[in-house]
Image: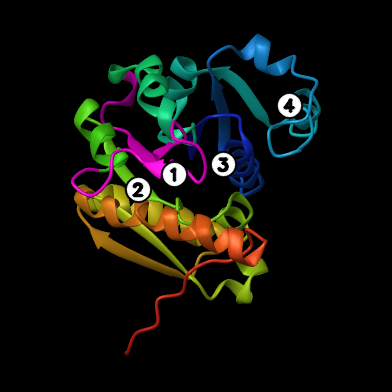
Amino acid sequence: MKIAVLGTGTVGRALAAAFNRLGHEVVLGTRDPAETAARTTPDAMGGPPFNEWLAGHDGIRLATFAEAAGDGEVVVNATNGAASLAALAAAGEARLAGKILMDVSNPLDFSQGRPPVLNPVNTESLAERIQRAFPEARVVKTLNTMNAGLMVEPRRLADGEHSVFVSGDDAGAKKVVTGLLAELGHRDVIDLGDITSARGAEMVLPLWLRLFGALGTPDFNFKVVRRG
């Protein structure tokens, strides 16, 4: 498939590299490709400078948000949650129309310090705002409840025996996303329901952040245990 990953941070890089390894045609979207490609300082998580990372992934093309979205059959929103609507607007409503929009972002609000809170929360989710802003896109919320490493290599923890969720209004889009999750190695994909169920998936984040602090590592995930 042709997959456009919007966002060049840790999550965007991890997903772009993983889908490229799986044989998909990947384009990585950013606001200013020239500026992004010229970065020579480590990223916010201490990862290699973007120019070094890109040089090691010659199968991945760097483009603007609009160019990437125009090329992709599936568009992955891996941008910062606070900037997601602006990034998707830059991609363009017409370029997103009819396409599967896989949203892995979280609406973290750091305005009151750390730990961050969610905005929106309870009565709305970021995924719902994205779906409302881009009504012709087929939004599916997923992968936002784990760190980037487990998104793309779930079997490094408990041999992959942990859960990932999908939320969205379009059954066909969820089927495609579930297939991509299986390619990444996810074994337990739980369909939570329509796009409003993304509220629950996003509200996992306050718990996730507290667990990160308590455990001292981001390499953990949730497993839903049930009968049958």
The span from disc 3 to disc 2 (Cα, nearest Å) is 20 Å
Q: Earlier in the sequence, mark 2 or mark 1?
A: 1
Q: Looking at the picture, which amino acid does disc 1 mark? A: Val
Q: Residue 212's mark? A: none
Residue visible at 78% across and 28% down in the picture: 49
Mark 4 vs 2, N-terminal side: 4
**Relative horizontal placement of residue 44, taking residue 154 as reference (left or right):** right
Extreme front residue here? 112
Tell me residue 36's x, y (percent).
66, 17
Instruction: Work out whether residue 216 or residue 195 is closer to the camera in this orientation and state it.
Output: 216
First reached walking from the N terminus: tag 1 or tag 3: 3
- Magenta span: 95-124
Q: Are marks 2 and 1 in contact (CB under 8 Å)?
A: yes
The tag on residue 50 is 4
48 left or right of 214 in image = right
Q: Is residue 83 above or below residue 171?
A: above
Residue on which disc 3 sits: 24
